[in-house]
Amino acid sequence: MIAHLPDLCLPAGSGPFPLVVYIHGGGWATGHQRNSCCLPDYLKPRGIAVTSINYRLSSDAIFPAQIQDCKPAVRFLRVNASKYRLDPENARMFAEAPTRTGCL
């Protein structure tokens, strides 16, 4: 399995910070975690951390591999919340397509 490390944008301060987990769009077929729109620019000044996670595209692995890639990234963030000054009880998912959030 390919390791997909999340990109994490932290606001200034000591935390713990609420967290938004962003999942890029592309119908599981295209896209990349670095195509994360303007969420960090909007949320960081408001004291909210933003992470963007990646997954194998459908050309590399059939569904539900994409879900199986996203779940460990979220678990990693929860387990390492104190290290990254995150509030694991105040985390939300955001996806460009509603089906992604529903799948997770």
Image: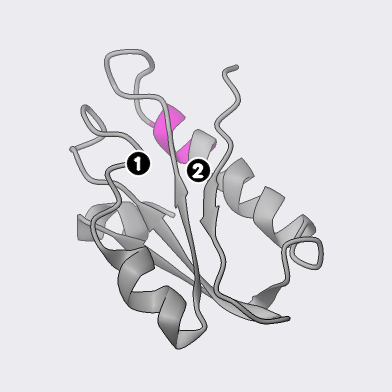
State the quadrant of the C terminus: bottom left
Residue 98 seen from this side:
yes
Residues marked 2 and 1 touching at CB (< 8 Å):
no
Q: Nearer the viewer, residue 11 or 97?
A: 11
Q: Nearer the viewer, residue 36 or 79?
A: 36
Q: Return the residue found at the far bottom.
A: 46
**Residue corresponding to mark 2:** 70
**Image coordinates for residue 42, horizontal then vertical, percent:** 31, 75
**Image coordinates for residue 15, horizontal then vertical, percent:** 70, 81
Foreground disc of the pair 2, 1: 1
Count up the numbered dots: 2
The Cα atoms of the two marked residues, 2 and 1, are separated by 15 Å
Tag 1: residue type? Arg
User: Majority secondary structure of the magenta segment?
Assistant: helix
Q: Return the residue found at the far top.
A: 60
> What is the number of the mark on residue 34?
1
Residue 90 seen from this side:
no
Q: Secondary structure at mark 1?
A: loop
Residue at image coords 41%, 33%: 66
**Image coordinates for residue 44, horizontal then vertical, percent:** 45, 75
State which region is magenta.
64-68
In which quadrant of the rendered view does residue 99 lie? bottom left
**Image coordinates for residue 12, horizontal then vertical, percent:** 59, 77
Tag 2: residue type? Cys
Left or right position of 52 against 38: right
Residue at image coords 35%, 13%: 60
Image position of 48 with respect to 5: above or below:
below
Q: Is residue 35 magenta?
A: no
Residue at image coords 43%, 37%: 54
